Image (cartoon, rainbow, N blue to C red):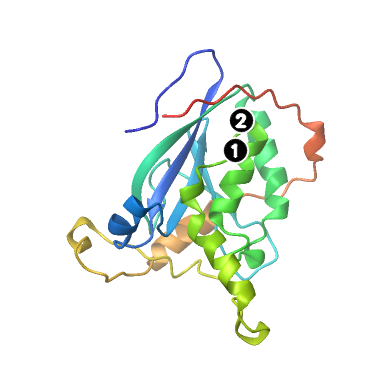
Amino acid sequence: MEAQNGGGGGSPVVLNVYDLTPVNNYLYWLGLGVFHSGIEVHGFEYGFGAHDLPTSGVFEVEPKCCPGYVYRRSIWMGTTAMSRAEFRSFIETLAGKYSGNTYHLISKNCNHFTDEVCKNITKKSAPGWVNRLARVGSFLNRLLPKSIQVSTISHGATCPAYSDDDMDSISSSTIGDSDVDELDQHLLPEAVVDLQSIHVSPKLPKDL
């Protein structure tokens, strides 16, 4: 595993990255790929997904085990002095900005969420390659006629998944009903708290 514990105290902040397609095995070495990411702090992983309701799309899962995705690697982002309760409050507050029906494949996806968390608690952005395809897509999308530009995309129940046996193919499957139900049970509520009222003491992150 590429994540590692650092000294200086505080709780580790780790970015867990997943593959959405076996094509990533080739694109990854070109600095591209279609990835999902979750942020791991205090033993839980938090991510952002789509659904049709104007409520929080932020959810928590067991680290490195997000349903429907294939874990690729972990990236050490630094540490945070926030307690478990403080961080949970921070995430629930941030969830107010990430309703499930506002998910957008190009402009507001799971990687935008984890990048914002990283910036807030470690003062460091997530690695560029994690969301590079969305940035390229945003540029290309602006060049298209307005009638065919990419709009909000809900993919909560159609996240691609594959096993090791599928690595040499381009086939993919979707999350099963049990996986969707499991994610629904872990959606976080939105907290009515001012982000500025939460004191964050970031530690300097270190690169791998």
Residue at screen point 53% across, 54% down: 185
Residue 196, located in which quarter of the rendered image?
top right
Residue at screen point 53% across, 63% down: 136
* Left or right: 164 in relation to 94: left
User: Where 111 sits versus 52, above or below?
Assistant: above
Q: How crowded is mark 1: few (under 14 residues within 10 Å), some or many (20 or more)?
A: many
Residue 199 image point, x, y percent = 75, 26
From the image, which quarter does the C terminus lie in?
top left
Q: How many marks?
A: 2
- The answer to whether residue 187 of the structure is visible from this angle is no
Residue at screen point 22% across, 60% down: 167
* Left or right: 72 in relation to 137: left
User: Where 38 sits versus 34, above or below?
Assistant: above
Residue 73 image point, x, y percent = 36, 42
- The answer to whether residue 121 of the structure is visible from this angle is yes
Residue 117 image point, x, y percent = 62, 41
Callout 1 amino acid: Cys
Q: How crowded is mark 2: few (under 14 residues within 10 Å), some or many (20 or more)?
A: many
Residue 66 image point, x, y percent = 41, 51
The residue identified by callout 1 is: 118
User: Where 153 sits versus 34, above or below?
Assistant: below
Q: For the residues labelled 2 and 1, say whether their Cβ atoms are less than 8 Å apart.
A: yes
Q: Residue 167: give its label.
A: none
Residue at screen point 43% across, 42% down: 16
Q: Is disc 2 placed on a helix, strand or loop?
A: helix
The residue identified by callout 2 is: 122
Q: Is disc 1 placed on a helix, strand or loop?
A: helix
* Left or right: 189 in relation to 173: right
Task: Tell which of 32 and 166 is nearer to you.
Answer: 32
Callout 2 amino acid: Thr
